[in-house]
Image (cartoon, grey):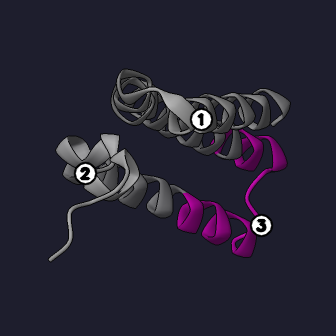
């Protein structure tokens, strides 16, 4: 089996916390199903909006944790190696931050 050629092929930063992320995403999935149920049951608009806000916040927290893991592992590893890979990872992280800020 050939050696990995980049830090991305070696591991992802979130791997040590994968079960935690999956648990958080399952809870968010449950929240989303709950919102669907609320609409089906004609729940008061403000109550639905409150749940949407909570779900959005939960997704944002997962996104920020993933970004932090990416910076601490994937980007830091690439910077340690240097060269084009480091520059590519920095640009990738910057673009991800830009997308998160816009949302």
Residue 16 showing in the rendered view: yes
Assess disc 2: are there few (<14), some (14-19) or many (≥20) residues with their C-alpha within 10 Å of its C-alpha.
Answer: few
Residue found at x 78% / y 30%: 98
Rendered location of residue 23, percent (x, y): 28, 53
Whole-number angstrom distance, CA of label 1 to CA of label 3: 27 Å
Q: Is residue 97 left or right of residue 62?
A: right
Assess disc 1: are there few (<14), some (14-19) or many (≥20) residues with their C-alpha within 10 Å of its C-alpha.
Answer: some
Q: Secondary structure at mark 1?
A: helix
Along the line of sight, the residue nearer the viewer: 39 or 77: 77
Mark closer to the chain start, 1 or 3: 3
Residue 99 position by quadrant: top right
Along the line of sight, the residue nearer the viewer: 65 or 15: 15
Q: Which residue is mark 2?
A: 18
Q: Which residue is mark 1?
A: 60
Whole-number angstrom distance, CA of label 2 to CA of label 3: 36 Å
Q: Secondary structure at mark 2?
A: helix
Rendered location of residue 57, percent (x, y): 60, 33
Mark closer to the chain start, 2 or 3: 2
Q: Quadrant of the C terminus?
A: top right
Rendered location of residue 63, percent (x, y): 54, 38
Q: Which residue is mark 3?
A: 42
Nearest to viewer (mark 1 / mark 3)? 1
Along the line of sight, the residue nearer the viewer: 20 or 38: 20
Indicate whether 9 appears above or below 33: above
Q: Magenta stretch containing residue 80, yes or no?
A: no
Residue 20 showing in the rendered view: no
Give the magenta part as a residue range.
32-51
């Amino acid at each position: 089996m050939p050696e990995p050629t980049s830090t991305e092929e070696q591991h992802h930063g979130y791997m040590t916390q994968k079960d935690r992320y999956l648990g958080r995403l399952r809870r968010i999935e449950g929240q989303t199903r709950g919102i669907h149920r609320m609409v089906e049951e004609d729940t008061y608009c403000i109550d639905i909006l409150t749940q949407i806000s909570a779900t959005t916040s939960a997704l944002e927290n997962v996104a920020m944790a993933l970004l932090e893991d990416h910076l601490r592992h994937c980007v830091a590893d690439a910077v340690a190696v240097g060269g084009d890979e480091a520059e590519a990872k920095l640009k990738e992280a910057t673009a991800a931050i830009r997308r998160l800020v816009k949302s």
